[in-house]
Image (tube, rainbow, N blue to C red):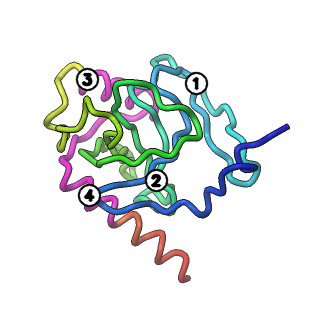
Amino acid sequence: MLFLSDFVDITRLEPGTKDIVNVFIESEKGSKSYYKYDPKTGLFNLNKLLKLPFTGSFGFVPKTHHIDANTMDVIILASDSIKQGIVVQARPIGIVRLKAPIPDEVLIAVSLADGEYKNVKDISDIDEETMKNLKSFLEEFKELKVDNVLDSQHAKNSVRRSIELYQRSRME
């Protein structure tokens, strides 16, 4: 049996920068299955079956610690589904913040390889219908209510802070 870890050493994957992040895809757009990557085994474990399908490909930015002490979650908006286990270079365009004792934030980004999204620079560039679907999905997926939608500048600052938090944790 072959495992993703036989081909990809995710520990070598860098997060990118505040302007362009590397996103490791765990679950594909359109799927109702939420998979979580286990770096110890190199396998994707089925974590949860959802009522609503993913509105974009879902993954994380490696070597980040977000405010909830986990890697930074990302939904990539794209014209097509991006396969599980793929690394995507993406432009942060916003943050969806969910209400919780420690706020849960999901970075919203667009793939640099997707020509349909080349002019999308900020969350305000996303149409109302897509935003409505994205918020509904995140509320169901995270089992939390959307508190706020924040712009690309906030998203870039959040990426920068997440990279810095990870680097500081490695020094301790």
Q: Give x and y (percent) for residue 143.
A: 45, 32
Please give the name of the residue rendered at 44% of the width and 45% of the height, measured from the top-left corner: 88
* Spatial separation of the CA atoms under disc 3 and disc 4: 21 Å
Residue under circle 4? 156
Residue contact at pointers 2 and 4, CB within 8 angstroms: no
Dot 4 alpha-carbon crowd within 10 angstroms: few under 14, some 14 to 19, many 20 or more: many
Which residue matches tag 1?
33
Nearer the observer, 2 or 33: 2
Mark nearer the viewer, 2 or 1: 2
* Looking at the image, residue 118 lies above or below residue 13: above
Tags 3 and 2 in contact by the CB under 8 Å rule? no
Judging by the rendered image, the residue that carries numbered circle 2 is 61
CA separation, marks 3 and 1?
20 Å
Q: Is residue 160 left or right of residue 5?
A: left
Q: Nearer the viewer, residue 115 or 26?
A: 115
Mark 3 or 1 closer to N-term? Answer: 1
Residue 58, percent across and down? 47, 36
Span of residues in magenta: 131-160
For mark 1, does the 10 Å Cα neighbourhood hold few (<14), some (14 to 19), or many (20 or more) residues? Answer: some
Q: Quadrant of the C terminus?
A: bottom right
